[in-house]
Image (spheres, rainbow, N blue to C red):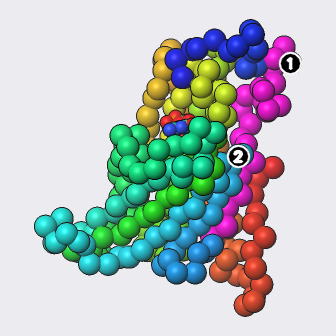
Amino acid sequence: MGGTPLPDGIKLIDENGKRLDGRRPDELRPLKIEAGALKRANGSAYLEWGNNKVMAAVYGPRECHPRHMQDPTKALVQCHYNMASFSVDDRKRPGPDRRSQEISKITSEALTHVVFTEYFPKTSIDVYIEVLQANAGTRCAGLTAASVALADAGIPMRDLVASCAAGKIDDTVVLDLGKEEDNFGQADIPVGYIPRDDEIVLLQMDGDLTADQFKTGLNMAIEACKKIYDVQRDALKRKYTLPAGKTDEGGGVN
Ligand code: CDP
């Protein structure tokens, strides 16, 4: 991010308005979600979004430890975002870092808005997000998968959170940045959205945009979140309507 020029004058958008992977500016990468991919977790979801592969698992509500963290009035939603060492080209140093702490925090906050935490005082709802393969947009992919995993765990929620980023590359506002677009682009705006309440629960911005570009990007991300929301609901419907013994093949957009 930050407008670094591409090597050899390669453009992120060609003369036909197509991006490096052939997408139009307002086109999402292919997205697939499978609800209930893990047997031992209370709820789970596996997601493939372009070249991102993410697993989300939910445990709880369960007694919150250490006890001094307990809230006598509500549950804590605690997200643990982790990128596997093998998820990126250069091996990532294992363990938590500032970036994973930041993503865990914003994801916890976004999900706290939708979970009826007051139903489960003194407990913790633990959400583990494991990025197995990363290709930009993993915080949005993690939040999208975690919402489905929470619903799969049967945790009462106002709605699902759908998440997607918009951004700016070659002075053009585009949807759902890929890795090169994230690295060499000018801006990135991850958005978390609740369609039913038309409410934004996550909004970040990296890079520079004019007020108009920001509005265009935000609207683009919100429209995309509505499509992602349908894929999330579909994943849950498929799991809970399939006859016993049948496995989920994974649905999606594109
Ligand atoms: O993944 P997201 O776009 O939400 O977060 P980011 O901090 O903007 O990271 C963008 C991308 O950079 C990630 O999705 C990874 O593909 C890559 N990355 C990496 O290669 N090594 C890291 N230690 C962190 C990120």
Residue 20 left/right relative to 214: right
Q: Residue drawn 75% across and 79% down? A: 247
Q: Position of residue 146 (x, y in %)?
A: 51, 61
Residue 24 left/right relative to 217: right
- In space, the residues marked 2 and 1 are separated at their CA atoms by 24 Å
Q: Position of residue 98 (x, y in %)?
A: 36, 40
Residue 34 left/right relative to 215: right
Q: Is residue 75 above or below residue 178?
A: below
Q: Is residue 197 above or below residue 234?
A: above
Q: Is residue 146 above or below residue 182?
A: below
Q: Looking at mark 2, is its residue's CB closer than 8 Å to ligand 1?
A: no
* Image quadrant where one finds the N terminus: top right
Q: Residue drawn 59% across and 32% down? A: 166
Q: Is residue 154 magenta?
A: no
SS under mark 2: loop
Q: Is residue 25 magenta?
A: yes
The amino acid pointed to by label 1 is: Asn
Q: Residue drawn 74% across and 74% down? A: 248
Residue on which the image places disc 2: 51
What segment is highlighted magenta in the picture? 14-35
Residue 72 left/right relative to 144: left
Q: Which mark is residue 210?
A: none
Which quarter of the picture shows residue 90?
top right
Residue placed farthest to the top in the image?
Answer: 9
Q: Position of residue 191 (x, y in %)?
A: 50, 40
Q: Position of residue 36 (x, y in %)?
A: 60, 74
Secondary structure mostly seen in magenta is loop
Question: If you read the primary sequence from the N terminus, does the residue marked by circle 2 or circle 1 appear first?
Answer: 1
Q: Residue drawn 74% across and 9% down? A: 9
Residue on which the image places disc 1: 16
**Can residue 188 be seen?**
yes
Name the quadrant where ligand 1 sits: top right
